[in-house]
Image (spheres, helix red, strand yellow):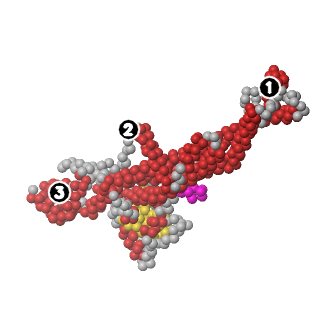
Amino acid sequence: NQPATRSKQNIIKKYPTLLKTMSEVEQTEGASSPKPTEGAVVEENHTELPSLTERLDDADQSARSPPSEAVSPDDVDADVVDTSQIESQQRRSANHSKLRAYEAKRRSAYASKLQSSSLYWRAFRSLMHDSVLETTKAEILLKGWTHASEIYCMSMKSVGDWCIDEKGVPVTDAKKKKKMLEAQEKEKSGASAGPGTGAGSDTSIFHAQKGNADSKRDALATAEFSMSEKCGSMIKNLASSAGSVASRYEENVNHMKQKVLPDVSSLLESLKSEIALMEKIGDSIISELEAAESEVSKAWDSYYTKAVEFSGSSSSELKSRRAGAQMGMTITPDDAVDGCSDVWLDEMRYRMAVAFLSSSWEKCSAELSNLFLSMKDTERQRRNRIKELMIESTQRQERLWLGLPSVVNPNLKELIEWPMERKLVEDDVQTSIRSRAQSIQRNDVEHKKADDSTPKAPGLSGVDENEGNFELSSPLVSDLMFKAKVIEKKCAGIMTSWKVTLAVVTSDSFLQLFELPSTCKLQSGSAPEVAFQSLIPPVVVPSMQGVKSGAKFPSTKSWFDHLVPSESIALPNCVITFKDDKTNSAFEIVETCLTSGASKVFTKTINRKLMLRAVTRDEAIDFIEALKGSK
C-alpha cells in the first residue's frame, strides 16, 4: 500500500486548492443529492461531479495494480477534475441559487401587489357602476316627479275648468275636454237670456240624471249655481284655486323639462362615457400586469428547465458541450457535439422579463393612480352637480308644497347641509372603496373552494425568500456570459451586405448574434451596453391619451422581438478561418449542423457560413480567441 499512499499524498500536495474546492462542492451539493457510495458505478447522466475521495481511491487502486499497469503522473493529472471547470460550476450553482431565491421573493411580493391592485380596481369598478346607477336613479326620479306633476297639473287644470265626470275624475282627454268647454260656453250664452233657462235648473239636471253618461257629464259641467250664497262662493273659489295650483305646477313642469332634466341626462351620458373609458383603461392595465407576470413565469420555467437539464449532464458531456471553436479543422458527424444548449439565453430572457415587469408596474401604478384621482374628481363633480339639481328641484317643489313644510323642510335641510368640500368627498370615496373591497374580499373567501391552492412554481419550493432581496443586474454582467462585442456580420450569398450586429459569446460555448433595429445608428466597435439597450423596446401601458388616440391594448406586437437572436451558433461545431495579415479584420465561421427529418436521407450534416468583421485586426484576433476558449 505504500505506492498508493504516496500517490494520494502527491496529489494532495500538488493540488492543495483542489482539495478545498472539491470539499466545498461536496458540501454544497450533498444537501440536494445523495453521494455515490464507494465502488458504485457513475452513470453518464449523473447529476454530480466525482468526489475527491473517489478520485483518490481510483489512484489507490491504480497503485495496487502490477507495475506494468501503473498509472503515470501525467495520467493522474489528466484524471483530476479541472480546477477552472469546478470553479465555473460553483459560479453557476451560486448564480442559480441566487436566482431561485430572487424569483421566490419576487413572486411573493408581486402576487401580493397584483392581488391588492386587482382588489382595489374591482372595488373601484363597483363604485363607478353605482355612480352610474345613482345618476340613472336620480334621472328616473326627477322624470317621474315631473311626470307626476304634469299629470297633477293637467288634472287640477281640468278641475279648475270644471271638466270633471260624474264620478269625480278629471277629464284630461283633449277631445272630451274640448266638447265640455264648448258646452259650457253654450250654457253661459243661454243663461244670459234669462233666469231659469240654464242647464243648471232643477228641470235640466233632473232630466240629465235620466240620460246617458255623456249627458250626465255635460249637465254637471255646464250647470251654474248662485254665487251669492257662501257655499257656492267657496266652491267657486276652491275651483279657481285649483286652476291657480295648476298654473304653478305647469310653471314647475316647464322648468324641469327645460332646465333640470336636460342637465341630468347630459350628466348621465357624460358619466357613462367617461366611466366606460376608465373601465377600458383600468381593465387593460390589470390585464397588462397579469400578462407581464405570466411572461416572467414562462421565462423562469424555461430557464429553470434548461438549467436543471444542463446540471444533469455528465462531466464528459459538459466538457464537450463547453469546448471552444476549432481552428482549421473539419468536423465530421461523429465529432459533432449533439444537444448543445445555452442557459444564458434563457437567463437573459428571464432577467429582461423581470425588468419589463418592473417597468410595467411603475408605469401602470402611475396610470392607476391618475385613474383613481380622475375618478375621485369626476365623482366629486357628479355629486356636486346632483346636489345642485336636487336642491333646485326641491326648492321649486317647496314653493308648491307650502302647505306641507314638515315633509319638505327635513329633506331640504339635509340636502343643504350635505358637505361638498373636496377633501371630505375624496375621503368619503376612499372609505367607500375600502369598504367595498372588504366586502368583495369576504365574498371571495366564502366562495373559494377548500382545495383551491396555488401551486408552487418549479424550483421555488424550500427557498429562503430573504436571500432574494436584491435587484437583478443586466444580462451583460451575468456569469453565463463570456464576451459581448458590436461587430459586422455578412451572411453567405452574393447580394448580402455587412450589417452591424451585437455578438454575445456565452459560457455555454454559443455565439448569439442580435440584429440591431433599423432606428439604431450604432457602428462596429460601439459599446455593447448601448447596443443591447437599443434592443429593449419602450414600455407602453394603457393610458387615457393612448386610448383616445386609438392605440390597441394589449399590443399585438411582442416586446421580446428584438431580444431573440437572429443567429444562434454552437461553437463546438464551428471552424474559424482567418487570413492573418496586417490589414485584415474579417474572418469566416462555418457551423456544421446535424440534419433532421427527411434531410437525413440525403446528408447527415449541413454547413452554415457567416463572415464577421471587427474594426481592427487586433480586435478580430481578440474576438477569435474568445470564440475558441469561452468557458
Q: Residue 58 falls in which quadrant of the image?
A: bottom left
Q: Main secondary structure of the magenta part?
A: helix
Identify the mark nearer the N-term, 3 or 1.
3
Label 3's element?
A: helix
Q: Amino acid at mark 1?
A: Lys
Judged by depth in the image, the label closer to the viewer, 3 or 1, is 1
**Quadrant of the rendered image containing residue 570:** bottom left
| Residue under pointer 3 | 56
Say which amino acid is labelled 2: Asp
Residue 191 position, x and y percent, is 87, 32
Residue 327 percent across, percent down from the top left: 37, 67
Q: Is residue 157 visible?
A: no
The range drawn in magenta is 543-550
In the picture as drawn, the residue positioned furthest to the left comes out as 2
Residue 514 against residue 216 in the figure, above or below = below
Q: Is residue 528 above or below residue 605?
A: below
Place of residue 501 in the rendered image (x, y in percent of width and height, measured from the top left): 47, 67
Q: Pointer 2: what residue?
A: 451
| 590 or 624: nearer the viewer | 624
User: Which label was assigned to residue 216?
Assistant: 1
The residue lying toward the viewer, choosing from 271 and 480, is 271
Q: In the image, residue 70 lies at what x, y percent?
A: 16, 58
Rounded to the nearest angstrom, the CA distance separating label 2 from label 3 is: 53 Å
Residue at 60%, 47% (x, y): give it.
390
Q: How many marks?
A: 3
